[in-house]
Image (spheres, rainbow, N blue to C red):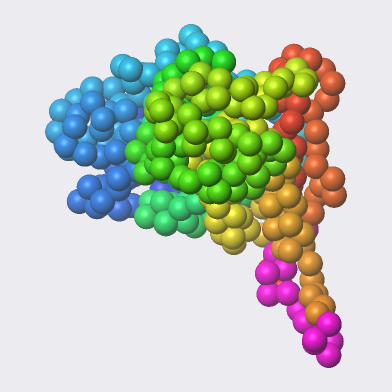
Amino acid sequence: MPSATAHSHPFASAVPSIGGARGTNARAGWMHRRVGLSQLSLWPWLGVSGDADHEKRFNPFGIHRGGGGDPLEPAPDGPSELVHYHEPVLCKEVLHYLQPGPATFALDATLGGGGHSELMLQKGAQVVALDQDPVAIAYATSRLRAHAGRFCALRGNFRRFPELLSEIGVESFDVILADIGVSSWQLNDASKGFSFMHDGPLDLRMNPDGPETAADLIRTLDAEDLERIFIDYGEEPHARRIARAIVKERATKPILTTLELARVVETVSPRKSHRHPATLVFQALRIRVNDELGALEDFLKAAPLWLKPGGRLGIISFHSLEDRIVKRAFQHYATEFIDRPEWPQPKRNPDHLLRLLTRKPVEPTAEEIQANPRSRSARLRVAERLSLP
Ligand SMILES: C[S@@+](CC[C@H](N)C(=O)[O-])C[C@H]1O[C@@H](n2cnc3c(N)ncnc32)[C@H](O)[C@@H]1O
């Protein structure tokens, strides 16, 4: 159970605005005390740069090095609050298993449109949230501004969360949630190129500052490497044929947009079901461009260590590659003794940190799938941090 008592976490005790004053100055005061203003320029994920607009958008605590303005106002170039950004999945299940409450301190590692953060805030929790997409940070920070005294959003990759959070003085959580993958907004945003339903540049980066776009891979990799990506990250049965078709096509004309790539795939992989033949190719490219599996593995290496005894870790995944990683990691952390044929006797597992709360992944109900078809592949696994010996 997440601890029900008020804990002595530095975030909880130091934020003067919790349950009280919610002014920008109070929040900024807290930040000043925790880290000292001079350190702020070292925080690239807060976007504290010389650019005032940029600073306003990614500075949820309203720390400014000059100039005024409301730090919580929507990003001028981001989605307005009226758009449908993302429908959070498995909400009842998340609340049931993670039990956020007034005395809980939670990490939402994948803020997106802020749906899960909001659920936890509504239960009284304090939430620190991360996202690598600046649009998600701007949108959700604005949408959740009523909770600003208990909510803080940081831009960054969750694979680096220990580094990001250590620097703001955070050490442990009662609840950690990651709802991995992409949001509906990202999928529908033609400029990101996540979906071949809209024509757009072959980008596929969640983080617009990421080093490589899908177009870079399509342009530079040889047929063997492309085939490997389609097999490893898409389990695409026609991987070889598709990779060769791409190499042949680009010899005459560059493949730069989503529809151009989808057409090449269609020529060698005809439609057999309701699923578009390019679905797995786009999934594979997206996973590779964002190193999604590597990020998840890194996250899982650290997450259990950041839970308080009794704290809970929930991961929502959307395809079998991710769920397999989560399942294996959870099993490893839940194993007390490891036995190997070459050992005379089993050894205690130094990583025995968790107790599984879900033997099988929790799936959405038929009603949820009907209301939100995108939820159909969601799988939630939850584990609890063991008490210290
Ligand atoms: C499925 S959406 C989360 C939706 C959110 N739970 C809600 O209720 O609106 C996933 C979000 O996680 C972000 N994301 C995915 N991988 C990430 C990573 N490695 N680090 C940080 N953010 C990531 C994406 O940019 C996206 O906004």
Closer to the camera in the image, 105 or 134: 134
Q: Is residue 353 magenta?
A: yes
**Which residue appears at 20% of the width and 51% of the height?**
38
Residue lying at the far top in this picture: please name it. 82
Assign the C terminus to one quadrant of the image.
Answer: bottom right
Side of 95 where 257 appears, left or right = left
Residue 158 % position (x, y)? 50, 47
Side of 363 where 263 appears, left or right = left
Please say if 217 is above or below 79: below
Side of 185 where 317 appears, left or right = right
Q: Is residue 292 visible?
A: no
Residue 173 % position (x, y)? 57, 51
Closer to the camera in the image, 187 or 312: 187
**Which residue appears at 44% of the width and 31% of the height?**
250
Closer to the camera in the image, 243 or 147: 243
Residue lying at the far bottom in this picture: please name it. 344
Secondary structure predominantly adopted by residues drawn in magenta: loop
Q: Is residue 366 magenta?
A: no
In the rendered structure, which segment of residues is drawn in magenta? 341-355
Residue 45 % position (x, y)? 35, 43
